[in-house]
Image (cartoon, rainbow, N blue to C red):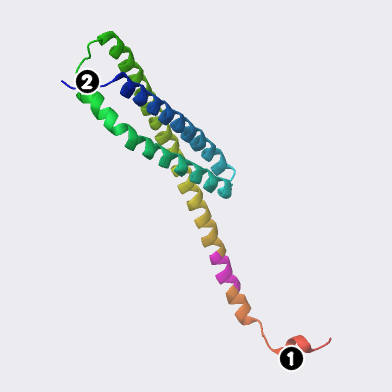
Amino acid sequence: MNKISSEEVERLTKLLGEELEHYKQIRKLTEEQALLLSKDDIEAFNDSLNKREELIEKIKGLHQEKEPLVQSCASASKSANPQSEGLQSKEIDTLSNQIREIIKDCAEINDRNILSMKEKTEELTKKIDEQSTKRKGIGGYVQSVPNTPEMFDKKT
């Protein structure tokens, strides 16, 4: 029977708490990104994406550190003091569930942001196509106008 020490449980709880805080920051950034998209503030949007990427890298580091602890918890049987482990397990479960909920929220907000970005892209593409069509139309008129130096040098 494998047992996980109380220090390992405390460490896992601390790591999950840190991870939860990072995910809360990611959710906040993702919500802000929706506002930035609506304002067409692409520079601030890109900065926000960079900040989110930094948080994701921190979470990856936490994952690497907590994975052995998660494995130990999963394989450990009930300890000699089941009440203590039960409380610690509930705290770990609560933190894990909160993290899952935030990830779900972020995914939904991100999907809406992607849809918004696609709509804006399609709108801008349409405007560019219209400008291109207008430019081609103007090009036809420009060809029919004489472009000789005598035309411009004469004083009337």
From the top left corner, tell me how far across and down residue 49 is, in percent: 49, 45
Is residue 13 found left or right of 33 in the rendered image? Answer: left
- Whether residue 69 is in magenta: the answer is no
State which quarter of the image contains the C terminus: bottom right
From this view, report whether residue 76 is shown above or below residue 54.
above
State which quarter of the image contains the N terminus: top left
From this view, report whether residue 88 is shown above or below residue 130.
above
Q: Which residues are magenta?
A: 132-138
From the top left corner, tell me how far across and down residue 83 is, in percent: 28, 8
Which residue carries the number 1 mark? 150
Residue furthest left as drawn: 1
Is residue 122 found left or right of 93 in the rendered image? Answer: right
- Mark 1: which amino acid? Glu
Front residue of 116 and 103 = 103
Q: Secondary structure at mark 1?
A: helix
Which quarter of the picture shows residue 35?
Answer: top right
From the top left corner, tell me how far across and down residue 73 is, in percent: 25, 24
The chief SS type of the magenta part is: helix
Which residue carries the number 2 mark? 3
Between the residue at mark 2 and the residue at mark 1, the CA separation in whole angstroms equals: 97 Å
Front residue of 100 and 2 = 2
Q: Which residue shows up at 28% across the image and 28% down it?
A: 70
Query: Looking at the rendered structure, which numbered label has been put on residue 74?
Result: none
Q: Nearer the viewer, mark 2 or mark 1?
A: 2
Few, some or many residues within 10 Å of mark 1 (<14, 14–19, 20+): few
Front residue of 111 and 25 = 25
From this view, report whether residue 48 is shown above or below residue 12.
below
CB-based contact (under 8 Å), mark 2 and mark 1: no
Is residue 73 found left or right of 14 in the rendered image? Answer: left
Q: Which residue shows up at 48% across the image and 46% down it?
A: 117
Q: Which residue shows up at 45% across the image and 48% down it?
A: 118
